[in-house]
Image (cartoon, rainbow, N blue to C red):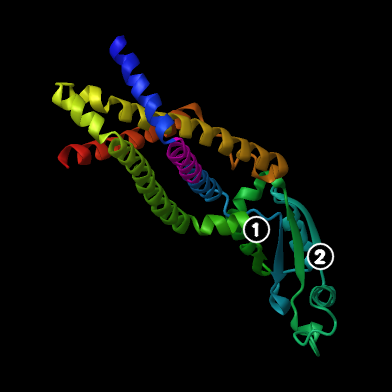
Amino acid sequence: MIRWLYILKLLLRGFYRRPWGGLFTFIAWWFALCQLILVFHTVTIAMQVKMIRGTTSTMIAYLAGEQQDGPPETIQAKIAAMKEVEGVVFIPRQSGLERLKGWLGNDSPLIEGLDSSILPDAFEISIRPAYAGRIDSIVFRLRSIPGIEDVRYDKGILGYIADAYQAILVSGAAIALIVTVSLCLVVFLSIRDSIVTRRKEIEVLNLLGAQRSFLYAPYLIEGLVYGIGGAVLALLFTEWAVGYIVSQAPLLRGILTMLEPREIAAIIATSCLLSLLGALLAIKQSIDG
């Protein structure tokens, strides 16, 4: 018991001798862990939306002009009969031209002299929200209806995120590796500096027969303080940020989620292992030196 009290005394003395160094190390550890957790959330979001490639609720089905089978009313009835469809609006080519003028402006050179006869008739189709994740399947069925030549839609921002999943995954792994190395380096430099400031004291205690486990235990505990404390504060900050973002953007509910208990435990454990690794490397270099 007395031995552990003395180790704790040495630990507190180390923090007292270099308060700013310990504070900066703790802040750097907290900041790096925040980045690591946010990278985890980013990859998780990309993985979630990868299953929802289409996120738009409206699409346009263009008719095949003179080759269409049956009047527009017949095709409209077939589209409206689909359970995924909430509503269908017929857009004659002249109305389509008027919409185009409204989007681009009457003076746009892109539509100057444009004849509505070259434009196809179309249907504006509204998709029920419950089926927003089945866009690809809906488009395939629409294109199979005789008379429909093409179907177009905007995937929405989540759809573009889904397309970039592989790039996000690779980038996230690279950032996670850089942050992991940085975490070990931060503790390594801090512990190394602490050992240097007490080198003479350590040498005297070593000559008196003190065991290495006793001499270097304060530095291992210091590393754990950075690991546990930094992880807890980083988790509190990032999870608060996630909750706030979701409250302001309900669309992200179900995609951007809070960490589960096992994920929180894994992050704290990883933080502790990295801090201990950095401390052990500093101790080993001190012994070898």
Is 26 within the magenta? yes
Residue 226's place in the image compared with 205, above or below, is: below
Q: Specify the segment rendered in magenta.
A: 19-35
**Alpha carbon distance from label 2 to label 1:** 23 Å
* Number of the label disc, if any, that sits on residue 94: none
Where, quadrant-wise, is the C terminus in this rendering?
Answer: top left
Instruction: Please provide percent x and percent y for residue 131.
Output: 66, 47
Residue 67's place in the image compared with 204, above or below, is: below
Side (left or right) of 240 relative to 109: left
* Residue 259 appears in the figure: no
Residue at 26% x, 28% y is 216
Residue type (three-letter) at the residue carrying disc 2:
Phe
**Residue contact at pointers 2 and 1, CB within 8 angstroms:** no
* Number of the label disc, if any, that sits on residue 90: 2
Residue at 32% x, 26% y is 218
Residue 228's place in the image compared with 75, above or below, is: above
Instruction: Please provide percent x and percent y for residue 196.
Output: 28, 39
Name the chief secondary structure element in magenta: helix
* Residue 202 appears in the figure: yes
Instruction: Please provide percent x and percent y for residue 21.
Output: 43, 40
Q: Nearer the viewer, mark 2 or mark 1?
A: 1
Residue type (three-letter) at the residue carrying disc 1:
Gly
Residue that numbered label 1 is attached to: 156
Residue at 36% x, 20% y is 8
Is 125 within the magenta? no
Determine the residue located farthest toward the top in the rendered image. Answer: 1
